[in-house]
């Protein structure tokens, strides 16, 4: 095991991973969907990605939550999402393209479900 400190927006792994976890880290990331799709490509064929994720933090340009269309797109891409536990997971290496284009983040979103400050991510739907 080795500890790496780097910006997740630019970091690329040296080799595929068997396990990728993100415990309460996505709340602070602007391009959450971009990170999830990149992390999916870092897995081994049987690797597991699991992260805390609140789909309500993915917003459309008018400020509305992306809603069911988002969770459907995530499931179609192979992700499993548990809204009650705020957990997303994926098993096995994937090259994923979601139908969303990242516009920016709202750091004034206020606290998320744990009460900690969070960032909402703004996307346009591209289909």
Image: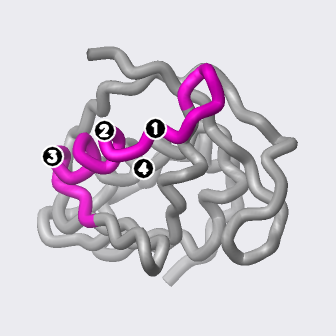
Q: Which residue is mark 2?
A: 69
The answer to whether 84 is drawn above or below residue 15 in the figure is below
Residue 24 sits inside the magenta stretch: no
Residue 70 percent location from the top left of the image: 35, 41
Q: Residues within 10 Å of mark 4 (few under 14, many from 20)?
A: many
Q: Quadrant of the C terminus?
A: top left
Residue 70 sits inside the magenta stretch: yes
**Which span is picked out in magenta?**
60-80
Q: Which mark is residue 66?
A: 1
Question: From mark 2 to mark 3, how far is it between C-alphas?
Answer: 10 Å
Q: Secondary structure at mark 2?
A: helix
Q: Quadrant of residue 83?
A: bottom left
Q: Residues within 10 Å of mark 3 (few under 14, many from 20)?
A: few
Q: Quadrant of residue 125?
A: top left
Assess whether mark 1 and mark 2 are in contact (beta carbons under 8 angstroms): yes
Q: Which mark is residue 76?
A: 3
């Amino acid at each position: 095991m080795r500890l790496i400190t780097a910006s997740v927006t630019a970091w690329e792994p040296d080799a595929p991973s068997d396990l990728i976890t993100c415990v309460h880290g996505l709340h602070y990331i602007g391009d959450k969907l971009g990170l999830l799709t990149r992390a999916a490509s870092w897995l081994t064929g049987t690797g597991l990605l699991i992260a805390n994720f609140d789909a309500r933090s993915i917003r459309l340009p008018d400020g509305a939550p992306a809603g069911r269309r988002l969770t459907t797109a995530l499931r179609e891409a192979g992700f499993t999402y548990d809204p009650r536990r705020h957990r997303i997971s994926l098993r096995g290496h994937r090259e994923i393209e979601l139908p969303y284009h990242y516009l920016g983040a709202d750091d004034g979103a206020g606290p998320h479900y744990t009460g900690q400050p969070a960032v909402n991510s703004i996307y346009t739907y591209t289909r």
